[in-house]
Image (cartoon, rainbow, N blue to C red):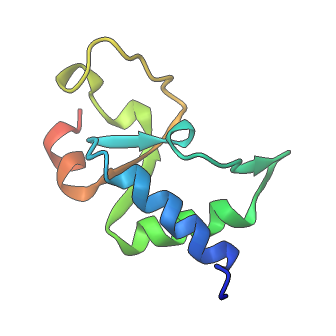
Amino acid sequence: MKSETIKQQTINEVKKVLKKGKKFYISTDFPFLQLDGFYLTYKAKIMNTYLRQKGYLMLKAKDYDFSLVDKKNRIRANRNIWITATNFINYKK
């Protein structure tokens, strides 16, 4: 029986989250720890690389106008979000 590597497990977890089809994703959308103190975990590094390869941009929430998407959820301005380039262009302030 062949077991999955940590890298493949992480990519599978990220794919499950991306299937939700949201306009943007924040760190709490992903089901694993991303920071250990002030250091990125191995899974977070894999996730960042994978999302960049899939065309996602990581930027600060203050660059994005959330009132156009969702008026109920308030995201802190200093929060990092993952968003596709087309969504960023459509909803940029």
Seen in the image, is 50 located left or right of residue 44? left
What residue is rendered at 69% in x and 50% in y? 34
Tell me residue 62's x, y (percent).
41, 31
In this view, the residue in front, 54 or 77, is 54
Tell me residue 39's x, y (percent).
80, 55
Tell me residue 9's x, y (percent).
60, 69
Tell me residue 68's x, y (percent).
17, 24
Seen in the image, is 57 located left or right of residue 3? left
In this view, the residue in front, 39 or 34, is 34
What residue is rendered at 53% in x and 34% in y? 79
In this view, the residue in front, 32 or 55, is 32
What residue is rendered at 28% in x and 25% in y? 66
What residue is rendered at 42% in x and 50% in y? 17
Question: Which quarter of the figure is the C terminus placed in?
Answer: top left
In this view, the residue in front, 88 or 41, is 41
Residue at the outermost right position: 37
Give the total number of marks visible in the rendering: 0
Residue at the outermost bottom position: 2
